[in-house]
Amino acid sequence: MSNTTQSEGLKVARLLMVLSSISPLFILWAIRGSKVVPDSYLIALCALMVTLPNLFLWLRIRAAKKHQVRRELVVGSAEDHRDHLLVYLFAMLLPFYPIDTGTWRDFVALISALAFVVFLFWHLNLHYMNIVFAIAGYRVFTILPPKDDNPISGRVSLVLITPRTSLLSGERVVAYRLSDTVYFEVKECQPRSTLTLQQS
Amino acid sequence: MPAPFDPNTATVIEFGVGIDDRRGQRFILVPIDADIQAALREMVITTREEMKGVEGNPTTYDPSQKYGAQEHLFLPLNDELAANVLKIHTATNLTSEPTALSNPVDVFCYFARMSDGKGHRLTAIRRATTFKGVLKSRLLQLTTDALKLVQEKIFKLDRDFDLLVDETGVNILRPAGFEFVGALEGAMLAAMPNNIKAIRADLSYVDFTSIEDYAKHHPRAARYLASIRIQQETKNIDKGYLKKLCKKTGVQVSEVNGKLVVDEGSIMDFLGVLDRRLYQVELVKGSPESFRAASRSRIGDTSRGASPSSKR
């Protein structure tokens, strides 16, 4: 009865999340400019590529919160994947930023290479790798399922974006669903002061 | 004893379906919105109310008993008959797959799992009959000023669940639903050799060879054996009294080398004797009457009384 295969849904959503994750690259390109594409077009295109995917990501989190699409995850073991940001840096930003797009062929080659990397990030479910999460103080953990004899329990590792600094084995986390394997735990609202709390 | 889970305290409500396809039986979560979560919460509350509405106190589920459509039965969590249902309750990180409903014919049950975030949980399960029944109907929808056929797949939630599982145990509203979802027939056939072994240890003077062979192909006999073992009342059965009751109720047994051998045509009746289902009364002098009880409970029990028995 165990289920070890899983087809990841939300294909468009995941693609937009990957595009959201590479938005810093578009900011750098817009600043740097191109010899073949006029600034007015390039800046407009880069602004679109920064705004739309991030707007979608925000809407996705907002919709999950609004519709309470959340579930309880049980931590078997958790791996902190801050080092994935380095992968992201080396796979995305560093190789693409310095390429000089002096000719149209260079430009098309650059866009094609970027498309390949985007496909790989989409295909490998690396859509959670987003520098915005890191800036907002979130960490990315890969949660491995607990080892139990229950054949119904999930065997697929899940990704949790959380403000927590550590996750203990056996811990239960309630998180919003961004995709079938990526979950997002929101920061708890902190009262501005204990005085306000007492008064209420 | 822990308190029953209060659905109003649930902070997380998950919905899932049981699927039986060429990959075998799987239990998969399907994401749902807040409205469906509220509907599932209401279903749990309705199930509790219907259980309360059943006359008398809840009785322990007995696999050999014939039950009505709605009862209030109970099983402790450690009972092996609850094993399959308990797996759904205790499973962690169930696979989430929104496309699970793309082939509704394969869906055999649906369930809700609730948690209050403090370690208390409840699982509610329902056999998927009405749920996918709407798919066969031709539904109409009023769009602008004309009726149109609804092309989308539509599913229907029931009013209540068949059973609820929480820390207190398994509370059953519909025994048939519990037996179906819990795959009890297969479980009892699988457990049959162990049940015979346990009963044989108490009744060393009975030859169980023919009974074991018979029960391999007759689920009803396997149910009786499970019931006899669960009741744990075979320990001090007197051989003489057993022979006497068999004779009174027409059960054909013979004694070979000190062991009682049951005639193949009387195996179900013999199991009925051990399960306290065959009995005799003599209210009219010289006219003893033998009965088989389709349902029975011990007199003096605080639980509900037995339903009417049928005369043999």
Image: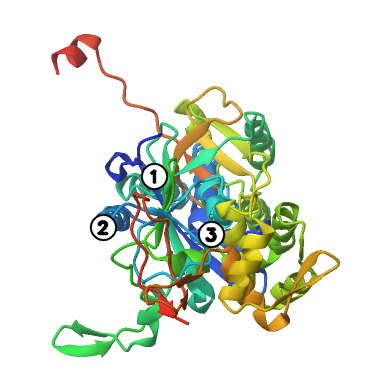
Residue under numbered circle 2: B46
Q: Chain of mark 1?
A: A
Do the residues marked 3 and 1 share a common chain? no
Quarter of the C terminus of chain A within the rendering:
top left
Observer-nearest of B73 and B147: B73
The amino acid pointed to by label 2 is Thr
Q: Chain of mark 3?
A: B
Helix, strand or loop at mark 3: strand
Helix, strand or loop at mark 2: helix
Name the front one of labels 1 and 2: 2
Q: Earlier in the sequence, mark 2 or mark 3?
A: 3
Observer-nearest of B306 and A128: B306
Q: Is residue A79 left or right of residue B104?
A: right
Q: In the figure, A157 relative to A200: above or below?
A: below
Question: Label 3 to label 1, Cα distance in Å?
Answer: 23 Å
Observer-nearest of B187 and B294: B294
The amino acid pointed to by label 1 is Ile
Residue at point 51%, 79% (across, down): B105
Name the front one of labels 2 and 3: 2
Q: Is residue B79 left or right of residue B68?
A: right
Do the residues marked 2 and 3 share a common chain? yes
Residue B128 visible somewhere in the drawing: yes
Image mark for residue B28: 3
Observer-nearest of A93 and B83: B83
Q: In the figure, A120 relative to B262: above or below?
A: above
Residue under numbered circle 1: A61
Dot 1: within a 10 Å radius of its alpha carbon, few (fewer than 14), some, or many (20 or more) residues? Answer: some
Where does the image place residue B222, in percent across and percent down from the top left? Answer: 64, 69
In the rendered picture of this protein, how many numbered marks are placed on residues?
3
Where does the image place residue B61, in percent across and percent down from the top left? Answer: 47, 58
The amino acid pointed to by label 3 is Ile
Dot 3: within a 10 Å radius of its alpha carbon, few (fewer than 14), some, or many (20 or more) residues? Answer: many
